[in-house]
Image (cartoon, rainbow, N blue to C red):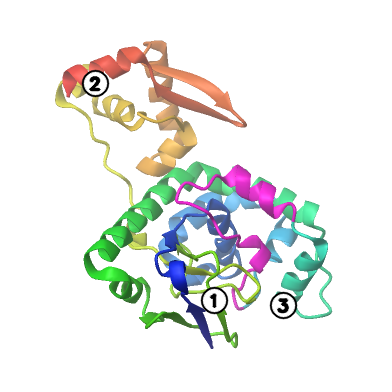
Amino acid sequence: MLVRYVLVGQDLADVRFAISPFNEMVLSLRAWRDPGRFPLHLPWIHETLRARHELDAETLSALANERLWTPDFLNPRPLSPVTRIEDEFASVATTPPAVVARDLRMLHGAAYRPPPLPRIMSALTGYWERCFAPHWPRMRALLEGDVTYRGREMAHGGLAAMFAGLARQVSLVGEVVEVQLRSNVTYTRATTGGLTLVPTLWTANASTPISPEEPPMILYAARGIGTLWEPQPLPSPGALAALLGAHRAGLLVQLATPASSTELAARLGVTTTAVNQHLRALRAGGLLVSARHGRSVLYRRSEVADRLLAGAG
């Protein structure tokens, strides 16, 4: 019912924030089990329904149980706010078979026969590519905003104020961080190597690894989840909008960093077909360049577009 992380020595200053795309992907599987528990994510759930029929649903469904627990080995501790999904996939792929079996049996019972790790990794790769990657930039922006907010809170009010603001289940008592859990997990351990705080879009309560053998980590609900799937406004400089039209000018503003048509459509709340029409016109006019990245085509502004925006700005 209670996990205590004892901050010792330098660990008092070694509280870090990090973001894990792998954690977010795995925790989102809770919505497969019980979509009614995630009403704020219904737009994403509806949009990914068709893709899910083409995935290894049997394996993916086994990665969360009826209580919406997920196995510890699929919730790796991220190292920074800019953790790469490729690095996390590579790390999880080296998990010993005994650990895979132990963690999955903690979810489903001692008689459960877990799928082999290569099958799990293959299922998750397909899930990431079809259901998660197109939406990850939008999710990441919200999570990064939360980390920035917590950093300011810690700078202005100190560690105790920051911990108290994470979740009602989390508090700092002296040099001990206490996390109240709904499960029957209870343990106390020192935060050797530091304590990592990870915002997530897929929990309403703070949570920690089930096993005390796992690195110290607290997952907590990020701020602003209710705004995540709202269509974003499409800003565009007035002069450029008059020349190109508001939608195309707005897309040029969005494409300061590369993005796919699917990602842009999800971000803006429009159809991929509509976005593609504008992207093709902008590319034909020399304002965009494109390059294939895996299964996606990424678009970004050309130097000509950069100069246009600078002049209009």
Q: Quadrant of residue 13?
A: bottom left
Check contact, mark 3 vs mark 2: CB within 8 A: no
Vertical comparison of 292 with 138: above or below: above
Segment tinted magenta in the rendering: 67-94
Question: Which residue is found at the position 38% from the left and 80% from the top?
Answer: 171
284 vs 162, left or right, is right
Disc 3 and disc 2: Cα gap in Å? Answer: 55 Å
- Where is residue 61 shown, x and y percent of the image? 68, 64
Q: Is residue 81 within the magenta segment?
A: yes
311 vs 91, left or right, is left
Residue corresponding to mark 1: 190
Q: Is residue 235 visible?
A: yes
Residue corresponding to mark 2: 309
Residue corresponding to mark 3: 106
Question: Which residue is found at the position 54% from the left and 76% from the top?
Answer: 190
Check contact, mark 2 vs mark 1: CB within 8 A: no
